Image: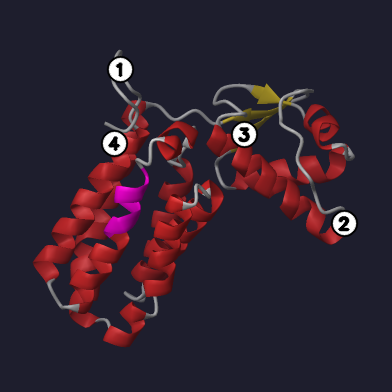
Amino acid sequence: MGHLKQRNLITTRERLRDQVAHALRAALISGELRPGEVYSAPGLAEDFGISATPVREAMLDLAREGLVEPVRNKGFRVTEVNERDLDQYTEIRALIEVPMIGRITRSAAREDLEALRPVAEDIVRAAREHDLIGYLDADRQFHLSLLALAGNDRLVETVGDLRKRSRLYGLTTLDERDQLIPSAEEHIELLDLMVAGDVTGAETCMARHLGHVRSLWAKPGPGTAPGT
């Protein structure tokens, strides 16, 4: 109770669950819901001014995404991700995505690559407009759609799962300092290199991008700004 800022929700039943899940994701990203803390569906429902049922359903959706985990008779604990986990997730993603970007650059039709340009532009636009949910949604769509051009559904599922487990928390500070914009612009750079058929350049850009993303996850030390 009292965990979240007041949010306006659509009360149509068939959409309420999705609206609550969207609001909870926003609260995770902003840091209103903190890793390691346990939150009850009734308590969150009181914040929203609705019944506990759609909140519980939405939390179960988030649990399937790896963002929270059920705690018996208490509620849901926000998943904690430590620095070692993030290093390992990034290493696995690099092993998969960097060579796959090279393969896709060699094999994908130019028009299929160009079809992703509006999504890449949406990422930059969302970063500039401080739309964190839009930023993450467009970023996910871009990367998974790009990998899908390789034709390996299991690979896309694997990377999607890694992205869920390493979801960014507390992006508000980074957004306020415009530290998301350079990372966002790398998507357009990557697409340009791939359209040009520059395999080495695309692989190098992808490796650098993953390194930058990992730096955004890093916990700042004393006197260090987040994301540096």
Of pointers 4 and 3, the one earlier in the residue sequence: 3
Residue 62 drawn above or below residue 202 = above
- Amino acid carrying label 4: it is Ser
In this picture, residue 100 sits left or right of residue 123: left
**What is the spatial separation of the Cα atoms under label 3 and label 1, in whole angstroms?**
28 Å
Element under label 3? strand
Camera-near label (3 vs 1) is 1
| Residue beneath disc 1 | 221
Query: Within the image, what quadrant is residue 122 found in?
Result: bottom left
Query: Within the image, what quadrant is residue 152 found in?
Result: bottom left
The stretch of residues the image draws in magenta is 180-186
Camera-near label (1 vs 2) is 1
Q: Are marks 1 and 2 in contact (CB under 8 Å)?
A: no
Q: Are marks 3 and 2 in contact (CB under 8 Å)?
A: no
| Label placed on residue 215 | 4
**What is the spatial separation of the Cα atoms under label 1 and label 4, in whole angstroms?**
12 Å
| Residue beneath disc 3 | 69
Element under label 2? helix
- Amino acid carrying label 2: it is Arg
**What is the spatial separation of the Cα atoms under label 2 and label 4, in whole angstroms?**
40 Å
Q: Is residue 221 visible?
A: yes
**What is the spatial separation of the Cα atoms under label 1 and label 2, in whole angstroms?**
45 Å
Q: Is residue 148 visible?
A: no
- Amino acid carrying label 3: it is Glu
Of pointers 3 and 1, the one earlier in the residue sequence: 3
